[in-house]
Image (cartoon, grey):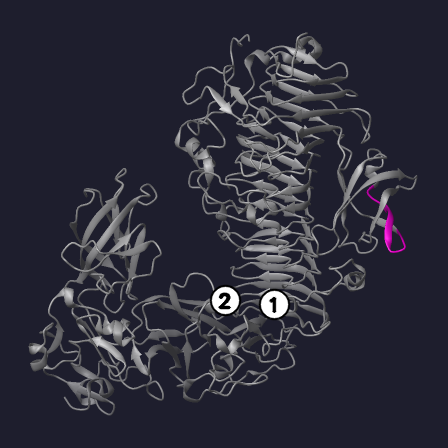
Amino acid sequence: MMLPSAIKFLTVTLLLGLVSISAIAQDVDRASTIFFGALECNFNISSAPCTSFSNLLPANMTINTKVVIECGTCAVIDEDLDVQIGGLLVVGKLHIPARKRVRILTPHVFVEGILRIDPPDSVVPSNYGVDIILTGVEDQIFSFENQPPVLGLPPQENFGSKPFAVVGGKLDIRGMSEECPTWSKLLDVRRADGVVKQIKVSPASFDCWGEGAEILVTSHWHCYTCHHQRKISSIDAQGWISLDQEIDDTTSEADHHDLAVEVALLSRHIRFRGEKSLASEKDGNVKAGAHTIIFRTPAPQIQLIQGVLFLNFGQAGRAGRYPVHFHMSRDVTGSRWAKNLVRDSFQRCYVVHGTHNLLVEDNIAYNTHGHCFLLEDSVETGNTFKRNLVAATEFPLAPLSIGGRPDESDKDPSSFWITNPKNNFIDNVAAGCRHNGWWFELTNHVRGMSASLPEANKLNPTVLPLGIYSGNIAHSNNGVGMKTYRGAKYQGPGSRQAMHGWKLYRNRFTGLFWTFNMIDLMNSYLADNINQPSVNFGRSGSSRLVDTTIIGDTALMMKQFKKFPSPYNKYHCGSHGRVGLWVQGGPLSFINTTFSNFNSFNGCEAAAIGLEYNSGGRWSLEQSFRETTLRNVQSAFMDFCRLTMGGKKWDDWLHSEVGIHDEDGTITSRESGAYLTAYPYFWNKTEKVPSGSELCDTSNGRIICNTGTLPIWSPECYSAQEVAPCSAVCPVACYEDVEVWVSMNSPAGMRMRVTNVKSGVFVDYNEQRPLSHAILYRIFAPKLPKAEMYEFKFFSEGKPIWPHSIFKIDKKGSCGDNFAEIKVYEPPVICGNAIINGDAETGNQDGWNKSTNTYMSNDTPRGSSYSFKLARRFQQSLDPRCIRGRQTLKFQADVKMIGIPCQNRGIAVMVGGIEIKKSDWEINKWFIWKHTFDIDSGSNGGNGIRFSTPFSWCVDLRMLLDNVSLRIEGQTFTPSAGLSPSPTDLPSSVPSLTAPCVNLKKGKCRKECVFTKKPKKIKVCFAKKETLEHDCSQHTARVSCKEIAVCKFANGKCFHSCDDLKKRKCIQAQFCKLVKIKNPCLGCQLVATCGSRR
């Protein structure tokens, strides 16, 4: 072969050097960013004379003969052709003019130059056409011999079997005219004897859809396989299409404008096919079709692939082997995939990978496996998907592993799989998928080989602005119409984003499962979705549903389902009944929402709105409704008295009360608006279970009600039996949702008492228990009206306790900054070592935030029993009673690094937001790590300590950790002024926190106060040394308590053997010593705190 004298070769900094796309892990580890462009010897190709393609075929040609069109030369297929060759390499230009009959069988097509195919004819089908059939099962090797030597450029590329690969070349394939639509909504039908024999589609199809063309009529029911394949037998002057065989009754726009199905053209003039070969030893049982790849070829090389059938493409279980695939080409502005059909694909459909600004328009996919239209690595932006149609998307034929990720999510296939929101999706249709129509599965980073692209640096797709999302449809999917669940949540760029015009109907499960933040869903339409609520809206923040119609059962569905073939002729009642909107908590808004046709049928309960009871402490009453319309709705809300989950009634669970804010009273008929709440949780088997909408009985602080705690705090509330059984309506100005997150090391069964300090009204709140997801904190979630001051106080078994640490107290709601002052009762504490279980001698992670990446080890530095073995991070919250304000903390720990050494990037410990790193350690050797931290924890105190390894780079490195201490310099005892220093019996009411004794002189220190002048210091019994300190209260069982040498168990409690010992016993005790501390009762103090005489 004659080599070109000069080549224009695009290189863009370092990225990847590929040897085999199937070996992506090795690709990432290798090197360089290499892109391909037009060959310089082809710059005058447009004016070069063309020779007949037949002249390139030798007289002694065999099926193994490879045909090469040299650089700078042009070949034209100027006559009908039927040939089998051993490969086609287009380095120059190959032109196939219109109105030719061409059939080429070849094991590969490689394009480094230009391949141009003109439209064979204007009407589909016709006697003219181009068939390129890719054959064989052997790997096809592409040589880079036409490219100059460049760092990182391998000598060749293995494209696997049956490739159609473009490497720096250009495709100009025009198989259909721009005016011919590939699909249309079904406008009308003519019925006879309950079946359809004639149909009418868009008039734009009249000039290009011909007799004999194959068409697809998508499903109109909750059945993703109930589509029809037919042929056009004739078309009359009025545009009525007669079918070669009738179809079951379906839905046209004449029947219902919003529920009509689609009709797609399945015939094409230009057909690329993968040979259907028998399974071989190489292929095994995996179906391996052909595949197309535009390989690292950015603009200005413009690709046009229009009007092509890709039949039997895709290779199951093989990365990078997809029917239509733009691979790592970055900016391809001007390139276009249009009017193509991917049919009978063995793996995926239209894949955009490491590529931006591509137009994907008016394409069809039918009978495919795995995700179909997709953005592969989450780096892809600026691409536009417009008016594409997908039907019959099936489960994958084989698991797919990419870049070390063992299992792509194709096992839950979706017709449109979106990993980066900054793309445009306009007027697309998902019309029948085995699982999801649309799935937004985001990550907070770029994955795969695209992570090495410059534009991937620090890219977080969850904070990018949305592209244009308008007019998209999902119907007849076996799972969810459109979902965002599973994956990272969209957070947005800081400003509110919007999507417009979703139509989600007749999906077998939920129409919409929404979890994203800060997005307005505008002008949506949902109808006839079954088995789950039509809209599952929650676990998100500040999203809004605006100008939306939600229909339970359309009149047309109630008419159609009885006539549908078995087993689809039964009315399906969802697991929650027929519910329009299912709200899961969070600051959500629903504006101008119309609910229609929610009525009980065949014993199936129906309601417009349901409130999720599986959200733990995440509920907010600021889920607001405004301009709500109810039409033909039996009940606005579900019957809260009847809800069950997993065979258990609500009273078997401990959860937050639920509710909504009816801003303008269009639901509760309160002109000034109101809150509606329900709370059937906190009673037990021995208590009287309320029936109906009983307001709360607050005797002894217990909550015996099913209407929420708001009626306890606000006498304006009243029973709302007529709105929703077992609920209350509270016509008040505002409420705050307060969430208190405390350490999981606090005792199970602990309660938090909330007291209105001014009125003395109090309620004991139980912990909220989420029924799913990792549980890292105990959450208490009272809903409270505006007040002057609330006190929060924690109890376990009737005695005040401290919950180890308070992670945060969140306030959210409508009251704003003037809600109330919150004071948390703080029992006194002895402060020395701020770390709990730093020596690991409990044999578990008690005191630390439980981590699945941390284990216990018997490898210890000083003869102890256990150490911690961590792979990533390990952390513990610090007691804010001890860690508060400006302090000096002395840190010390025994550390040993084990495993496979790698580049030493340093281990780290962080205290109070200050992180230090240590890199001078030796592998497999214990050392003592010391540091002094000067921190400022602020007035609220707290913070934490966190250890971390360089796990991102050193995956096989582990840290052993033992004898961790964090000593507070110059502090041993911190009393809580005005509050009891020792546990007392649970009082019948909580005293006022106006601190009546604070700062009073001796003469005015009287009544409930007592004045103490001496002694200035007192002796307190402490543990003898740091290693003998232990938080015994964390053990609730006798056995686990007595396993710790310094702990004792009595009266159902585990406590330290030094606690409250008098002088003589403390001196005699094995583990204890007397320490002088400042007398906490000096000055004027409460009698309840320090006793009546001093």
Mark 2 → mark 1, Cα distance in angstroms: 19 Å
Tell me where residue 77 appears, x and y as whole percent. 72, 15
Q: Position of residue 670 (x, y in %)?
A: 63, 77
> Who's the residue at 25% across and 52% down the image?
909
Instruction: Answer with left or right where residue 613 lies relative to residue 1070.
Output: right
Residue found 81% across the figure and 31% down from its top: 125
Three-letter amino acid code at the position of disc 1? Phe
In the displayed structure, 881 sits above or below 13; it is below
**Range of magenta residues:** 191-202
Where does label 2 land, which residue?
Answer: 615
Residue matched to label 1: 625
- Residue 581 occupies which quadrant of the picture? bottom right
Image coordinates of residue 174 in percent, x first then y, are 72, 26
- The residue furthest bottom is 1007
Pick out the residue farthest to the front: 281
Question: Is 193 a magenta residue?
Answer: yes
Locate residue 458 relative to residue 267 in the image: left or right: left
**Element carrying mark 2:** loop
> Which is nearer the eye, 270 or 795?
270
- In this rendering, does residue 970 appear at all? no
Instruction: Kindly indicate the quadrant of the structure image that contains residue 662.
Output: bottom right
